[in-house]
Amino acid sequence: MNHWIVAPIVLPAILAPFIIMVLRYHLDLQRIFSVAGVVGLLGIALTITAQAAGGDIQVYELGDWPAPFGIVMVLDRLSAMMVLLTAILALPIVLYAIASGWDDRGKHFHALFHFQLMGVCGAFLTGDAFNLFVFFEVLLIASYGLMTHGGGSVRLKAGVQYVAYNLIGSTLFLFALGTLYAVTGTLNMADMAVRVAELPADDTALLRVGAVLLLLVFCIKAAVLPLHFWLPASYANAPLPVAALFAIMTKVGAYSILRMYTLSFGPEVEVTQGLVGAWLQPAALVTLAVGAIGILGSQHIARMVAFCAIASMGTLLIAISLFTETATAAALYYIYHSTLATALLFLVADLVMERRGGKISPTPPMPQSGLISALFFVGAIALAGMPPLSGFIGKLLVLDAARDAPDVFVVWAVILIGSFVTIVGLARAGTLIFWKSHAAEYNPAPEDEDEETPALPAPEPNPGLAFTAIFGAVLGLVMLTLFAGPALNYAGKTAEQLFTPEDYISAVLGGEE
């Protein structure tokens, strides 16, 4: 067996308890081991992505127990590219957390960070629906600690809301798994696909209930309207480097929809045919619209970026809901873009909040205002989908994939109007934070002349490393734009592999009943 498959889970699973038990009183050593662990994870991710690029689907049987009786990890193009995205995202975030001193504002940041990576990578690699639930819980438990890192009553309140809402999702997940197991007798995704296809059409009511419950769970994770209420407050009040890492968590929900509803409940399965698209597409359209309106109406920069995450998920799920190879390839390209762009804007928002506070209103100019405004501009045009960055390519691909959809004009109208509203909202925020702040320095409003100017917060312990980390995220977007051709080629082959689930089933079950 190929042990590289399980390495993205084992490495952070070993490193996190080592940091807690051995390095808990040595922050410098925690930082060294944490960065080394993320670099190692990136190397592993590049290796397994190269292995999966050939199209072979590899299976890792834990304890040498074959599927469907044992736990299996499965490496295909989709799981490899998602693990690689996780590692690419983690590196600038951990460097920024160290440079800004966020990791020193609470306890066990680096251990929780690696437990989070373990849960995310495990969710992408598992071939079993129950272990998908297990890894969901691992990443959620770690995210609970990261949410409240640094303390504060507001952050604790948002953390409690986050915990409560996700516990509801976890409960629904268990109900869905119990229902599906009662109908099919298995929770292995490949085995479930075989058994679902064999069910008679007049005996599938309970199966449809389980499929709908599972879709609700994944929509909660992906922050689809009206199940999105947890995201704006949770992301806006979390430490913003943590919120940048959380950009991958909504993609876990999108990944799960793609995996389950092209494999176990594929479009060709009669009993669940049309079930997902009929529900998901209207919800995705409304999610994009509400996200764009939230960007326009936000009065705080962190909350505005949280609504940017919601709007980008709306665009992504519109592409997924079309359930065609072309639309799925566009969605896979857009996953990379939206994750990096959202993380970039969260890190820029943290720079702004550390220097002037988060309110979107004119204040005296802050240190490094020119450089931060340039980074904000890059993040804004990326998330709004303006040329020349990858957001423009991604949205163009989604629009092109929707040409043959029955409601193509509705999809195009929502995406284009949503992009315009997003541009206006981000331009408004940039104008008030950066441009009018300089005007306010020379032309202060009369009612503000007698007010005491608040003291600026202390700068980052290592601003050079902080800016380097953010430029790393910018570099990721630039590379995704320059190498859009190879990226789209890989995404197209991944979509083709997703829509031929027979290869996945054969690899996992080994041709045995």
Image (cartoon, rainbow, N blue to C red):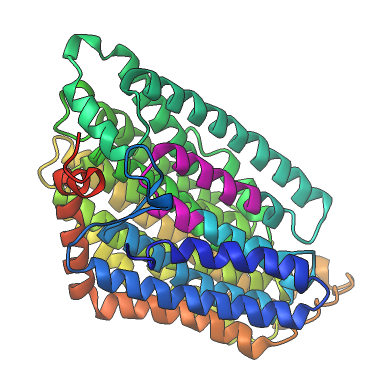
- In this view of the protein, can residue 187 be seen by the observer? yes
Image coordinates for residue 152, horizontal then vertical, percent = 82, 54
From this view, report whether residue 460 is shown above or below residue 48.
below
Looking at the image, is 508 positioned above or below residue 194? below
The quarter of the displayed image where residue 424 is located: bottom left
Q: Position of residue 124 (x, y in %)?
A: 40, 53
Q: Quadrant of the N terminus?
A: bottom left
**Is 82 located above or below residue 94 in the figure?**
above
Residue 86 image-quadrant placement: bottom left
At x 15% / y 23%, what residue is drawn? 270
Left or right: residue 315 compared with residue 122 = left
Magenta residues, as a range?
Answer: 120-143
- What residue is at 26 percent from the left and 26 percent from the top? 275
Q: Main secondary structure of the magenta part?
A: helix
Q: Can residue 241 be seen in this view?
A: no
At horizontal 14% and vertical 40% (from top left) the residue drawn is 405
Q: Is residue 409 magenta?
A: no
- State which quarter of the image contains the C terminus: top left
How far across and how far down the image is residue 251, in percent? 42, 52
Outermost residue toward the top in this view: 202
Q: Which of 401 and 120 is in front in this view?
A: 120
Q: Is residue 352 left or right of residue 396?
A: right
At horizontal 34% and vertical 75% (from top left) the residue drawn is 47
Q: Looking at the image, which residue sits at the far bottom?
A: 464
Q: Is residue 273 left or right of residue 390?
A: left
Residue 281 occupies which quadrant of the picture? top left
